[in-house]
Amino acid sequence: MMRTFKKVVGHSMLIMLMLMGTSFLAGQDSAKQDNQENTDNSTHNVTGCLGKTSTANIYALTDEDGKPWDLRSETVPLGPHVGHTVTVTGTIPKDSKGSGSPGDTAPQNHLVVTGLKMVRDNCKQP
């Protein structure tokens, strides 16, 4: 009798762990899909001097036209390139685009960086 009880409990725990793993994986796919749906799906290239902001994991870049960009990346290490002239590739999150109206106070565009190419190891113009 005790042996049967242990089998039932063991199988129940195994099934429960498998269901929890499946739920976790489904949540991961959903998060990736949400991130993709929150971008404009077009690739942008921006070249300029890379700097660090006071906020963790957020970097700043002023492009060659003087336009400021707010950069983030979960896949590209930006930190080692602070103070360098770089070209970054990425997508703009949908919720960060300025409206372009006169009352729009958005100071810069946001870019989720997916690639980086170093142009120069400094920010001085050649």
Image (cartoon, rainbow, N blue to C red):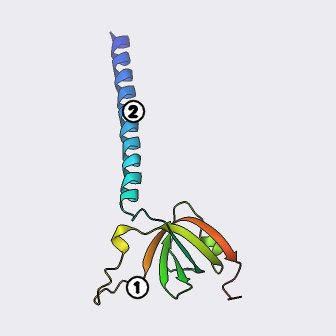
Query: As shown in the figure, which amino acid type bears the numbered disc 1?
Result: Pro
Query: Which one is closest to the eye, mark 1 or mark 2?
Result: 1
Query: In the image, which disc is placed on residue 17?
Result: 2
Q: Position of residue 44 (x, y in %)?
A: 50, 70
Q: Mark 1 = which residue?
A: 107
Q: Residue at x 34, y 24 (%)?
A: 12
> How far is mark 1 from mark 2, CA to CA?
47 Å
Assess disc 2: are there few (<14), some (14-19) or many (≥20) residues with their C-alpha within 10 Å of its C-alpha.
few
Give the percent coordinates (x, y) of residue 9: 34, 22
Helix, strand or loop status at disc 2: helix
Residue 60 tag number: none
Judged from this view, the residue extending furthest toward the top is: 1
Instruction: Note whether 49 is above or below 26 in the view shown.
Output: below
Query: Which kind of residue does numbered mark 2 sit on?
Result: Leu
- Indicate whether 90 appears above or below 14: below
Secondary structure type for disc 1: loop
| Front one among 50 and 118 | 118
**Which residue shows up at 36% across the image and 83% down it?**
106
From where the camera sits, is residue 10 visible?
A: yes
Does 19 appear above or below 114? above
Q: Choose between 20 and 42: the one closer to the eye.
A: 42
Residue 119 position, x and y percent, is: 68, 76
Pointer 1 local density, CA inside 10 Å: few below 14, some 14–19, many at least 20 = few
| Left or right relative to 47: residue 42 | left
Between disc 1 and disc 2, whose residue precedes?
A: 2
Residue 74 drawn at (x, y percent): 51, 61
Q: Compare residues 86 and 16 and report the one nearer the observer.
A: 86
Residue 55 shows in this picture = no
Identify the image quadrant of the N terminus: top left
Q: Residue at 39% of width from left, 31% of height from top?
A: 18
